[in-house]
Image (tube, rainbow, N blue to C red):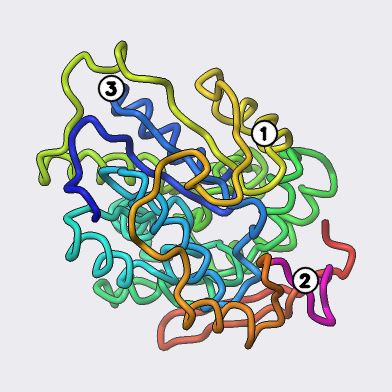
């Protein structure tokens, strides 16, 4: 039985890796009395090159276990996962159990619409996010805007490797961002939660006149709104009595902890490696992955039972895909086989 969420429960935040820590940082800063339970699905990430079906299976599996663990709010701190499962997640958790689900796409769009001066907005994201057209669909309410989307998959690889500067990163950024400069965008949405960690190089390439929009701060505001709307704010002054924030990784905890401490700070007291979140928390009744989801993630996409890619192109980037729509442009960039 899934219990009704309570104000003293933690906020569940997850991403495919360390990028979601930018959202966790904003939540901690804006809501210092709240406890965070963060999961980095590093065993299956990055999600960007994966199919929507795979991302959906992994994301719903993690959210099932976070709900079983008793979190009061779910934060999908990953653009690829937000694009893949938001509607399913709200039906599965909010409508059924009263657990609010907050994502990162709409907050970024809202901020970009307010920020643009010339109506030309750029979006950079993973291949999964760009090909999903999630941003184009969200911007559709403002048809007067011109949207240019570009997939920048190697940015995630740089961040996950702890590389935030250097000539190779700069050259990659110049190549990725050239179409956006040509389009004359004055506002650029960082459509992946890893990308704020590359703000320095992105700003250098785009120039000071271009406003960079990160969803982290706006998402944290949406988390607060959800807590108030559902009566789930933590007790005043409760931070001193609550246990610290908890960080879990499905892959190598040491590498994750090193990057987490660098990007988030002293709040990361330690990272526990878990195959399932149930190893850290008691679980309830939700199935981690349904047979249909498992079939979609494994049978049709060449993935083994452990979620790792085992098909003929293992180790190589998947082909880039482009998106086009009336008034909106999607651009995918080709990747080198040695990307890493």
Residue 63 sits in quarter? bottom left
Please determine whether, in this image, residue 213 is positioned above or below residue 91.
above
Write down the region rendered in magenta: 308-317
Residue at disc 3, secondary structure: loop
The residue that label 2 is drawn on is 317
> At which x and y percent is residue 74?
33, 50
Please determine whether, in this image, residue 267 is positioned above or below residue 71.
above
In the picture, measured across the screen, residue 297 lies left or right of residue 292, that is right
Category of crowding for the residue at label 3, using alpha-carbon neighbours closer than 10 angstroms: few (below 14), some (14–19), many (at least 20)? many
Mark toward the start of the polypeptide (3 vs 2): 3
Please determine whether, in this image, residue 228 is positioned above or below residue 107.
above
Q: CA distance from mark 2 to mark 1?
A: 23 Å
Q: Is residue 315 magenta?
A: yes
Q: CA distance from mark 3 to mark 2?
A: 41 Å
User: In what quadrant of the picture does the N terminus appear?
Assistant: bottom left
Residue 266 sits in quarter? top right
In the picture, measured across the screen, residue 2 lies left or right of residue 273, that is left
Q: CA distance from mark 3 to mark 1?
A: 24 Å
Q: Is residue 200 magenta?
A: no
Q: Residue furthest right?
A: 338
Closer-to-camera residue (316/322): 316
Mark toward the start of the polypeptide (3 vs 1): 3
> At which x and y percent is residue 340?
82, 56
Report if the CB atoms under discs 3 and 1 are less than 8 Å apart: no
* Residue depicted at x 84% and y 82%: 312
> At which x and y percent is residue 260?
61, 32
The residue that label 3 is drawn on is 33
């Amino acid at each position: 039985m899934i219990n009704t969420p309570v104000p003293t429960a933690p906020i569940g935040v997850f991403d495919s890796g360390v990028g979601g820590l930018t959202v966790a940082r904003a939540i901690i800063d804006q809501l210092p009395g709240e406890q965070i339970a963060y999961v980095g699905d590093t065993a299956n990430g990055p999600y960007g090159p994966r199919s929507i079906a795979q991302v959906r299976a992994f994301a719903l599996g993690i959210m099932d276990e976070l709900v079983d663990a008793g979190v009061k709010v779910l934060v999908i701190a990953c653009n690829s996962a937000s694009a893949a499962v938001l509607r399913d997640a709200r039906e599965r958790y909010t409508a059924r159990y009263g657990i609010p689900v907050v994502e990162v796409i709409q907050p970024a769009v809202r901020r970009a619409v307010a920020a643009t001066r010339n109506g030309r907005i750029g979006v950079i994201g993973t291949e999964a996010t760009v090909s999903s057209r999630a941003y184009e669909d969200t911007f559709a309410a403002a048809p007067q805007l011109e949207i240019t989307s570009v997939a920048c998959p190697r940015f995630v690889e740089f961040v996950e490797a702890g590389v935030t500067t250097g000539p190779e990163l700069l050259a990659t950024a110049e190549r990725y961002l050239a179409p956006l400069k040509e389009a004359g965008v004055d506002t650029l949405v960082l459509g992946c939660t890893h990308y704020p960690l590359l703000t320095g190089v992105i700003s250098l390439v785009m120039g000071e006149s271009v406003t960079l929009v990160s969803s982290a701060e706006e998402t944290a505001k949406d988390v607060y709104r959800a807590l108030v709307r559902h009566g789930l704010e933590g007790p005043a002054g409760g931070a001193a009595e609550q246990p610290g924030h908890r960080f879990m990784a499905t892959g190598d905890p040491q590498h994750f902890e090193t990057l987490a401490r660098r990007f988030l700070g002293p709040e990361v007291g330690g990272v526990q490696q878990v195959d399932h979140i149930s190893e850290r928390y008691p679980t309830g009744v939700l199935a981690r992955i349904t047979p249909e989801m498992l079939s979609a993630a494994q049978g049709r996409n060449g993935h083994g039972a452990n979620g790792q890619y085992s098909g003929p192109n293992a180790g190589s980037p998947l082909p880039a895909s482009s998106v086009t729509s009336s008034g909106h442009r999607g651009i995918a960039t080709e990747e080198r086989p040695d990307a890493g």
